[in-house]
Amino acid sequence: MSKLEFRHYAKELLNIALPIIMGNLGFILIGAGDVLIAGRHSTDTLAAISIATAITNCIQTFGIGLIASVSPLLSNFRGEKKAAKKYFFPTIRFAMILSVIVMFAVLAFIPLVDFMKFEEHLVPMIKEYMFVTAFATFGGYLHAAVKEYLQAFEIVMFPNLLTVFAVFLNIILNIVLVFGFGSIPSMGVLGLAIASFIVRYFMGLVLLAYCFIIMRLRNYQEKDYYKSLIKIGLPISFAILVEFVAFNSVAILMGRVAGVYAAAQNLVCTLTTVSFMVPFAISNAISVKVGFANGAGNIYDLKRYSLVGLIMCISFMIFSSIIFSTFPKTLVGLFTIDKNLFEICVPVLYILSVFQVFDGLQIGLAGIFKGIKKTGVVLVANFTAYWVLFLPMGYALAFKYGMMLKGFWWGLVIAAISLCIIMLSVLTKNLKQLEKA
């Protein structure tokens, strides 16, 4: 591939990815804002929301994974010259049905917190945060569904500018509701939950209004569309769920030892997720461009977008790794002044700097598989890496060999390497099959 050709495909990907990067970073900075304010309020507040979000994320992620099938499916329709705009209302209905199911799932889990052996003084705060978060599911799923729909048509600027604005709105609401302002009392954990509730509904409703302004939309129903979403989305959903449960189980398991470990895991995950949003956005761009090329039967473009996208993902994560390993104390200091958190988090960031590179490669590969509608591969690879390898190995290193949080992160490094090997070997075979077809 020539330099000129590389620049062409990189530019095409970046046209989609850059606004998504901006939006994804904004979305993560909303969570980072919660961590920042919680850490400044107290270590107990940070520990409580760390455990609560670890649990709710595992439940809510299932629906988000299904919604993530919207953009690759509609991109394939566009590549095949099929009508795609008519699926707006079916997409919204799909998301709202999912939100009802997930809301009740979160509410049903709350009583179980009493039996999970967390520190007693944290339990009421965990349950309080989860209760409010359950009802915020509708706003979060509405936003995710509309954003996926627009992304399929490469309309990415406004949705992601909205997310950036929401970062500042969230911080203001957090400060006011957590610490109190004027006649508004200090609410602590409850204030964080209410702020998140308001921001999610704001983002969802504004994006919905935007669609009605820029598009002529008519009601339409087609059962086959829902079947296609489920067929493509279930493997994506389970793959994301497998990964999220693995990551968040660390906060839950370590939180049973002491709340400070759950707080440390949340802090480290916040840092890595901020950098992860860049290759994640590139992965979304890959899935759209590869999906269009796949629908059009253009294998040449499909392979070029895949290769260039992977190079972009890995390059950024190498840069990110250098930052994490060079300034670990500075990065941790952005969120806390607690000496215990410093002692736990700083050594983990050195391990994280190794994990970053392989994490960037695997998310790029996942974008390719989404584009060619082979999402089952992502599910099997994630399950093997995170459940068969990571959880047993991480648990043994953490508790049997006394490495605690560092043990889990070394397990994640091994899992990420294994995940990349599995996905690369399968992708090579799939590309050869596409060439012969």
Image (cartoon, rainbow, N blue to C red):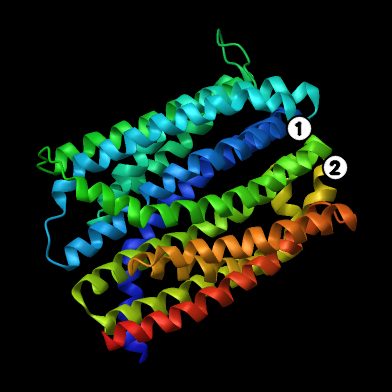
Image vertical order of residue 105 relative to residue 19, above or below: above
Could one spot residue 360 in this view of the protein? yes
Image coordinates for residue 44, horizontal then vertical, percent: 75, 29
How packed mark 1 is, by other alpha carbons closer than 10 Å (few <14, some 14-19, many 20 or more), is some
Image coordinates for residue 87, horizontal then vertical, percent: 18, 47
Residue closer to the observer: 187 or 78: 78
Image coordinates for residue 397, horizontal then vertical, percent: 83, 59
Q: Quadrant of residue 220?
A: top left
How packed mark 2 is, by other alpha carbons closer than 10 Å (few <14, some 14-19, many 20 or more), is few
Image vertical order of residue 301 relative to residue 251, above or below: below
Image vertical order of residue 280 relative to residue 198, above or below: below
Q: Quadrant of residue 122?
A: top right
Q: Are marks 1 and 2 in contact (CB under 8 Å)?
A: yes
Count of marks, rendered view: 2
Could one spot residue 200 in this view of the protein? no
Residue 43 is tagged as: 1
Query: In what element is the residue under mark 1?
Result: helix
Residue closer to the observer: 347 or 290: 290
Relative side of 76 to 117, left or right: left
Residue sitting at x 46%, y 29%? 103
Task: Work out whether mark 1 precedes mark 2 in sequence or the reverse, and give the earlier one.
Answer: 1
Residue sitting at x 44%, y 78%? 427
Image coordinates for residue 26, horizontal then vertical, percent: 46, 46
Image vertical order of residue 404 relative to residue 411, above or below: above
| Residue wearing tag 2 | 340
Q: Quadrant of residue 190?
A: top right
**Quarter holding the N terminus?**
bottom left
In the rendered structure, which amino acid carries the disc numbered 1?
Answer: Thr
Residue closer to the observer: 145 or 186: 145
In the rendered structure, which amino acid carries the disc numbered 2?
Answer: Asn
Residue closer to the observer: 51 or 229: 229
